[in-house]
Amino acid sequence: VLDDKVGGLNPGDLVLVVGYTTEGKTHMGVQLAWNASVVQGLNVVFLTTETIRSTVRRRFICRHSTLEHFDIPGGLNSRDVKNATLTDVQKRQFAAVVDDFARNPGYGRRWISQVPRSATIGYIESKLVRLQRMFPIDLVILDALYLLRPEKRRNTDREELSGILKESKQLATTFNDGLGIPLVSPWQVSRSARQEAERTGSYTSQALSETAEASNSADVIVSLLAPIDNDQRRVNLKCQVMKNRDGERAGATEVAVDYATSRFSVASQQTGSMDGLFAGFEATRL
Protein backbone atom coordinates (compact mmCIF):
# COMPACT_ATOMS: atom_id res chain seq x y z
CA VAL A 1 0.00 0.00 0.00
CA LEU A 2 2.74 2.47 0.94
CA ASP A 3 4.75 1.76 -2.20
CA ASP A 4 1.69 2.28 -4.38
CA LYS A 5 0.81 5.56 -2.69
CA VAL A 6 4.28 7.12 -2.73
CA GLY A 7 5.20 5.90 -6.21
CA GLY A 8 8.93 6.52 -5.93
CA LEU A 9 11.29 9.20 -4.63
CA ASN A 10 12.12 11.83 -7.22
CA PRO A 11 14.83 14.46 -7.59
CA GLY A 12 13.90 17.53 -5.56
CA ASP A 13 11.91 15.56 -2.97
CA LEU A 14 12.49 16.26 0.70
CA VAL A 15 11.26 13.19 2.58
CA LEU A 16 10.84 13.06 6.37
CA VAL A 17 10.54 9.79 8.31
CA VAL A 18 8.68 10.84 11.44
CA GLY A 19 8.62 9.10 14.80
CA TYR A 20 9.82 9.10 18.38
CA THR A 21 13.22 7.88 19.52
CA THR A 22 14.07 4.18 18.83
CA GLU A 23 10.97 3.59 16.69
CA GLY A 24 13.02 2.64 13.61
CA LYS A 25 13.70 5.87 11.72
CA THR A 26 17.39 5.17 11.11
CA HIS A 27 16.62 1.54 10.30
CA MET A 28 14.25 2.72 7.57
CA GLY A 29 17.02 4.95 6.23
CA VAL A 30 19.29 1.91 5.99
CA GLN A 31 16.50 -0.07 4.29
CA LEU A 32 15.93 2.66 1.70
CA ALA A 33 19.64 3.13 1.02
CA TRP A 34 20.28 -0.61 0.76
CA ASN A 35 17.32 -1.14 -1.57
CA ALA A 36 18.37 1.74 -3.83
CA SER A 37 21.97 0.55 -4.14
CA VAL A 38 21.61 -3.24 -4.16
CA VAL A 39 18.21 -3.79 -5.77
CA GLN A 40 18.14 -0.77 -8.09
CA GLY A 41 21.86 -0.31 -8.70
CA LEU A 42 21.80 3.39 -7.73
CA ASN A 43 24.46 5.43 -5.96
CA VAL A 44 23.63 6.44 -2.39
CA VAL A 45 25.27 8.81 0.09
CA PHE A 46 24.43 8.14 3.74
CA LEU A 47 25.38 11.06 6.00
CA THR A 48 25.18 10.32 9.71
CA THR A 49 25.20 12.78 12.60
CA GLU A 50 24.01 10.80 15.64
CA THR A 51 25.05 7.24 14.71
CA ILE A 52 28.72 6.48 14.17
CA ARG A 53 29.77 5.33 10.71
CA SER A 54 30.80 1.82 11.80
CA THR A 55 27.28 1.23 13.20
CA VAL A 56 25.67 2.28 9.92
CA ARG A 57 28.07 0.07 7.97
CA ARG A 58 27.28 -2.89 10.26
CA ARG A 59 23.55 -2.39 9.70
CA PHE A 60 24.08 -2.35 5.93
CA ILE A 61 25.98 -5.64 6.10
CA CYS A 62 23.35 -7.30 8.29
CA ARG A 63 20.58 -6.07 5.98
CA HIS A 64 22.52 -7.54 3.04
CA SER A 65 22.87 -10.87 4.85
CA THR A 66 19.11 -11.47 4.54
CA LEU A 67 19.38 -12.10 0.78
CA GLU A 68 18.20 -15.62 0.04
CA HIS A 69 21.32 -16.78 -1.79
CA PHE A 70 23.39 -16.45 1.41
CA ASP A 71 21.10 -19.03 3.07
CA ILE A 72 21.31 -17.41 6.52
CA PRO A 73 17.92 -17.86 8.23
CA GLY A 74 16.90 -14.50 9.63
CA GLY A 75 20.19 -12.90 8.55
CA LEU A 76 23.12 -11.94 10.76
CA ASN A 77 22.28 -10.19 14.02
CA SER A 78 23.98 -6.77 14.18
CA ARG A 79 24.43 -7.18 17.93
CA ASP A 80 26.47 -10.36 17.40
CA VAL A 81 28.57 -8.60 14.78
CA LYS A 82 29.15 -5.66 17.15
CA ASN A 83 30.02 -7.87 20.12
CA ALA A 84 32.16 -10.29 18.06
CA THR A 85 29.99 -13.22 19.20
CA LEU A 86 29.48 -14.80 15.77
CA THR A 87 30.01 -18.54 15.56
CA ASP A 88 32.70 -19.93 13.26
CA VAL A 89 30.04 -20.69 10.65
CA GLN A 90 28.62 -17.17 10.96
CA LYS A 91 32.09 -15.68 10.61
CA ARG A 92 32.48 -17.41 7.24
CA GLN A 93 29.00 -16.25 6.26
CA PHE A 94 29.86 -12.72 7.34
CA ALA A 95 32.98 -12.75 5.17
CA ALA A 96 30.95 -13.91 2.17
CA VAL A 97 28.33 -11.20 2.73
CA VAL A 98 30.96 -8.46 3.03
CA ASP A 99 32.77 -9.65 -0.09
CA ASP A 100 29.58 -9.62 -2.14
CA PHE A 101 28.45 -6.28 -0.74
CA ALA A 102 31.78 -4.63 -1.53
CA ARG A 103 32.66 -6.22 -4.86
CA ASN A 104 29.48 -7.08 -6.74
CA PRO A 105 29.56 -4.91 -9.89
CA GLY A 106 25.78 -4.98 -10.17
CA TYR A 107 25.33 -2.83 -7.08
CA GLY A 108 25.45 0.94 -6.93
CA ARG A 109 27.93 2.77 -4.77
CA ARG A 110 27.30 3.39 -1.08
CA TRP A 111 29.22 6.20 0.57
CA ILE A 112 28.85 6.48 4.34
CA SER A 113 30.15 9.71 5.84
CA GLN A 114 30.34 10.94 9.43
CA VAL A 115 29.04 14.51 9.70
CA PRO A 116 31.15 16.63 12.07
CA ARG A 117 29.73 18.43 15.06
CA SER A 118 28.07 21.80 14.28
CA ALA A 119 27.85 21.07 10.55
CA THR A 120 25.43 23.15 8.50
CA ILE A 121 23.46 22.53 5.31
CA GLY A 122 26.20 24.52 3.56
CA TYR A 123 28.73 21.92 4.74
CA ILE A 124 26.45 19.09 3.57
CA GLU A 125 26.08 20.70 0.14
CA SER A 126 29.83 21.17 -0.30
CA LYS A 127 30.38 17.54 0.72
CA LEU A 128 27.85 16.33 -1.84
CA VAL A 129 29.34 18.52 -4.56
CA ARG A 130 32.75 16.92 -3.97
CA LEU A 131 31.27 13.43 -4.07
CA GLN A 132 29.27 14.25 -7.21
CA ARG A 133 32.60 14.78 -9.00
CA MET A 134 33.50 11.16 -8.16
CA PHE A 135 30.19 9.50 -9.04
CA PRO A 136 26.60 10.55 -9.83
CA ILE A 137 24.54 10.69 -6.63
CA ASP A 138 21.01 9.28 -6.91
CA LEU A 139 19.84 9.39 -3.28
CA VAL A 140 20.93 11.09 -0.06
CA ILE A 141 20.03 9.86 3.42
CA LEU A 142 20.82 12.43 6.11
CA ASP A 143 20.51 11.12 9.65
CA ALA A 144 19.40 13.58 10.96
CA LEU A 145 18.50 17.11 9.86
CA TYR A 146 17.45 18.30 13.30
CA LEU A 147 20.99 17.82 14.63
CA LEU A 148 22.55 20.24 12.14
CA ARG A 149 23.47 23.81 13.01
CA PRO A 150 21.58 26.60 11.23
CA GLU A 151 23.46 28.82 8.79
CA LYS A 152 22.13 31.84 10.67
CA ARG A 153 21.44 31.99 14.38
CA ARG A 154 17.77 32.58 15.25
CA ASN A 155 15.93 33.67 18.37
CA THR A 156 14.41 30.25 19.13
CA ASP A 157 15.08 26.57 18.42
CA ARG A 158 11.85 26.44 16.44
CA GLU A 159 13.02 29.21 14.12
CA GLU A 160 16.38 27.51 13.68
CA LEU A 161 14.77 24.18 12.79
CA SER A 162 12.48 25.94 10.33
CA GLY A 163 15.53 27.49 8.69
CA ILE A 164 17.28 24.12 8.42
CA LEU A 165 14.20 22.59 6.79
CA LYS A 166 13.93 25.39 4.24
CA GLU A 167 17.63 25.09 3.41
CA SER A 168 17.30 21.31 3.07
CA LYS A 169 14.42 21.67 0.63
CA GLN A 170 16.44 24.16 -1.40
CA LEU A 171 19.37 21.73 -1.47
CA ALA A 172 17.14 18.88 -2.67
CA THR A 173 15.75 21.12 -5.41
CA THR A 174 18.85 22.95 -6.64
CA PHE A 175 21.56 20.27 -6.31
CA ASN A 176 23.47 19.24 -9.44
CA ASP A 177 22.79 22.44 -11.38
CA GLY A 178 19.08 22.31 -10.68
CA LEU A 179 18.49 18.67 -11.55
CA GLY A 180 17.78 17.99 -7.90
CA ILE A 181 18.16 14.93 -5.70
CA PRO A 182 15.92 12.96 -3.31
CA LEU A 183 16.87 13.83 0.28
CA VAL A 184 15.54 11.62 3.09
CA SER A 185 15.91 12.33 6.80
CA PRO A 186 14.48 11.10 10.10
CA TRP A 187 12.47 13.68 12.06
CA GLN A 188 11.87 13.18 15.76
CA VAL A 189 8.58 14.16 17.40
CA SER A 190 8.09 15.21 21.01
CA ARG A 191 7.16 12.89 23.86
CA SER A 192 3.69 14.46 24.06
CA ALA A 193 3.14 13.79 20.34
CA ARG A 194 4.21 10.18 20.89
CA GLN A 195 1.79 9.81 23.79
CA GLU A 196 -1.06 11.26 21.73
CA ALA A 197 -0.27 8.88 18.86
CA GLU A 198 -0.36 5.97 21.28
CA ARG A 199 -3.78 7.12 22.47
CA THR A 200 -5.28 7.59 19.00
CA GLY A 201 -3.43 4.79 17.21
CA SER A 202 -1.52 6.93 14.70
CA TYR A 203 0.30 10.20 14.23
CA THR A 204 -1.48 13.26 12.88
CA SER A 205 -0.27 16.58 11.51
CA GLN A 206 -0.41 17.89 15.08
CA ALA A 207 2.70 15.81 15.81
CA LEU A 208 4.65 18.32 13.71
CA SER A 209 3.01 21.41 15.17
CA GLU A 210 6.12 22.34 17.14
CA THR A 211 7.91 22.85 13.82
CA ALA A 212 5.22 23.68 11.28
CA GLU A 213 7.87 24.08 8.59
CA ALA A 214 8.32 20.29 8.62
CA SER A 215 4.84 19.97 7.14
CA ASN A 216 5.35 22.88 4.76
CA SER A 217 8.78 22.05 3.31
CA ALA A 218 8.57 18.26 3.06
CA ASP A 219 7.20 16.65 -0.10
CA VAL A 220 6.64 13.27 1.55
CA ILE A 221 6.16 12.50 5.25
CA VAL A 222 6.09 8.89 6.43
CA SER A 223 5.47 8.11 10.10
CA LEU A 224 6.45 5.09 12.19
CA LEU A 225 4.66 4.10 15.38
CA ALA A 226 6.03 1.19 17.42
CA PRO A 227 4.30 -0.53 20.35
CA ILE A 228 5.01 1.29 23.59
CA ASP A 229 7.95 -0.01 25.66
CA ASN A 230 8.88 -2.41 22.87
CA ASP A 231 12.03 -4.46 23.47
CA GLN A 232 11.57 -7.18 20.85
CA ARG A 233 13.86 -7.85 17.90
CA ARG A 234 10.94 -8.10 15.48
CA VAL A 235 7.80 -6.02 15.79
CA ASN A 236 4.93 -4.74 13.70
CA LEU A 237 4.92 -0.97 13.24
CA LYS A 238 2.08 1.28 12.19
CA CYS A 239 3.34 3.12 9.15
CA GLN A 240 1.45 5.81 7.26
CA VAL A 241 1.96 8.37 4.51
CA MET A 242 1.02 11.60 6.26
CA LYS A 243 1.87 13.84 3.31
CA ASN A 244 2.50 13.15 -0.36
CA ARG A 245 2.69 16.33 -2.40
CA ASP A 246 2.33 14.61 -5.78
CA GLY A 247 0.20 11.64 -4.80
CA GLU A 248 -2.15 10.03 -2.34
CA ARG A 249 -1.85 9.68 1.38
CA ALA A 250 -2.18 6.31 3.12
CA GLY A 251 -3.68 5.52 6.50
CA ALA A 252 -1.90 3.47 9.12
CA THR A 253 -0.63 0.21 7.63
CA GLU A 254 1.15 -2.51 9.60
CA VAL A 255 4.67 -3.34 8.48
CA ALA A 256 7.18 -5.63 10.15
CA VAL A 257 10.70 -4.57 11.08
CA ASP A 258 13.60 -6.70 12.23
CA TYR A 259 15.81 -4.32 14.22
CA ALA A 260 18.70 -6.80 14.12
CA THR A 261 18.95 -6.53 10.32
CA SER A 262 17.14 -3.22 9.56
CA ARG A 263 14.82 -5.17 7.29
CA PHE A 264 11.30 -3.90 6.72
CA SER A 265 8.70 -6.22 5.28
CA VAL A 266 5.03 -6.84 4.73
CA ALA A 267 3.50 -7.71 8.09
CA SER A 268 2.02 -11.20 8.10
CA GLN A 269 0.78 -12.52 11.39
CA GLN A 270 -0.28 -15.81 9.84
CA THR A 271 2.92 -16.79 8.06
CA GLY A 272 5.50 -14.51 9.61
CA SER A 273 6.83 -13.89 6.11
CA MET A 274 9.56 -11.32 5.57
CA ASP A 275 8.91 -10.43 1.95
CA GLY A 276 10.76 -7.27 0.95
CA LEU A 277 9.01 -3.94 1.35
CA PHE A 278 9.64 -0.51 -0.18
CA ALA A 279 10.82 -1.89 -3.50
CA GLY A 280 8.67 0.89 -4.89
CA PHE A 281 10.53 3.57 -2.94
CA GLU A 282 12.68 4.14 -5.99
CA ALA A 283 15.13 6.97 -6.28
CA THR A 284 14.33 7.93 -9.85
CA ARG A 285 17.39 8.61 -11.98
CA LEU A 286 17.01 11.33 -14.62
Image (tube, grey):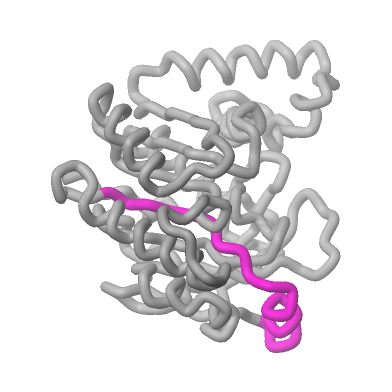
Magenta span includes 157: no
Region of the chain picked out in magenta, as a range: 181-201
Looking at the image, residue 273 sits to the left or right of residue 125; the answer is right
Q: Residue at x 61, y 64 (%)?
A: 188
Q: Is residue 81 above or below residue 181?
A: above
Answer yes or no: is residue 67 visible. Answer: no
| Residue 248 shown left or right of residue 256 in the figure | left
Q: Nearer the viewer, residue 157 or 204?
A: 157
Quarter of the image containing the C terminus? top left
Q: In the current view of this chain or complex, which residue is farthest to the bottom?
A: 200
Q: Quadrant of residue 20?
A: bottom right
Residue at the spot x=16%, y=48% of the render?
A: 179
Image spot of residue 60 (x, y percent)? 57, 33
Image coords of residue 252 (percent x, y): 56, 77
Quadrant where the N terminus sits is: bottom left
What residue do we see at 70% from left, 38% from top?
A: 74
Whether residue 23 is visible, yes or no, is: yes
- Picture coordinates of residue 168, whole percent (x, y): 37, 56
Q: Vertically, is 93 above or below 133?
A: above
The location of residue 277, given as percent across then percent down, is 50, 53
Q: In the image, is residue 162 above or below residue 96?
A: below
Of 118 and 96, nearer the camera is 118
Residue at screen point 45% across, 47% down = 120
Q: Quadrant of residue 200?
A: bottom right
Q: Determine if the magenta segment contains residue 187.
A: yes
Is 76 placed left or right of 57 in the picture?
right
Number of numbered tags placed on the structure image: 0
